[in-house]
Image: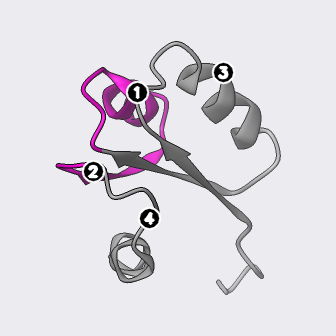
Amino acid sequence: MTEKGPVVAACIPAFNEEASIARVVLMAERYVDRVLVCDDGSTDMSGVIAEALGADVVLHETNRVRPSIPTVRRVWSA
């Protein structure tokens, strides 16, 4: 919660989604305050594209199947 009130966030998992991640991030940004993309070991440009569009990106070097909650908390507490 911020001084202005609660923050609404979208957490988007991504694995080799460069063809669609831009559309998903841009659509999510219309409805939430923050967008977090968990790039789960992608070998394409998914994370780079999401970050260029303003999303916070958690990058896993290898595919872990599901995002790490402690990692998400660490990114947003910074």
Part of the protein shown in magenta: 41-62
Q: CA distance from mark 2 to mark 3?
A: 19 Å
Element marked by disc 4: loop
Q: Which residue is mark 3?
A: 23
Looking at the image, the residue that sits furthest to the right is 31
Report whether 16 appears left or right of 4: left
Label 1: which secondary element: loop
Q: CA distance from mark 3 to mark 1?
A: 14 Å
Q: Residue 23's spot in the image, x, y percent? A: 66, 21
Per the model, the C-alpha gap separating discs 1 and 4 is: 15 Å
| Residue assigned mark 4 | 67
- Seen in the picture, residue 47 relative to 2 is either above or below; the reply is above
Instruction: Identify the image quadrant of the C terminus.
Output: bottom left
Give the amino acid type for the residue marked by disc 2 in the picture.
Leu
Pointer 2: what residue? 59
Q: Residues within 10 Å of mark 3 (few under 14, many from 20)?
A: few
Q: In the image, what residue occupies the spot 35% across and 34% down?
A: 47
3 or 1: tag closer to the N-terminus: 1
Say if 31 sits above or below 1 in the image: above
The Cα atoms of the two marked residues, 2 and 4, are separated by 10 Å
> Where residue 64 sits in the image (x, y, percent)?
33, 58
Give the residue displayed 76% in from the left and 80% down from the top.
Answer: 6
Mark 1 belongs to which amino acid?
Asn
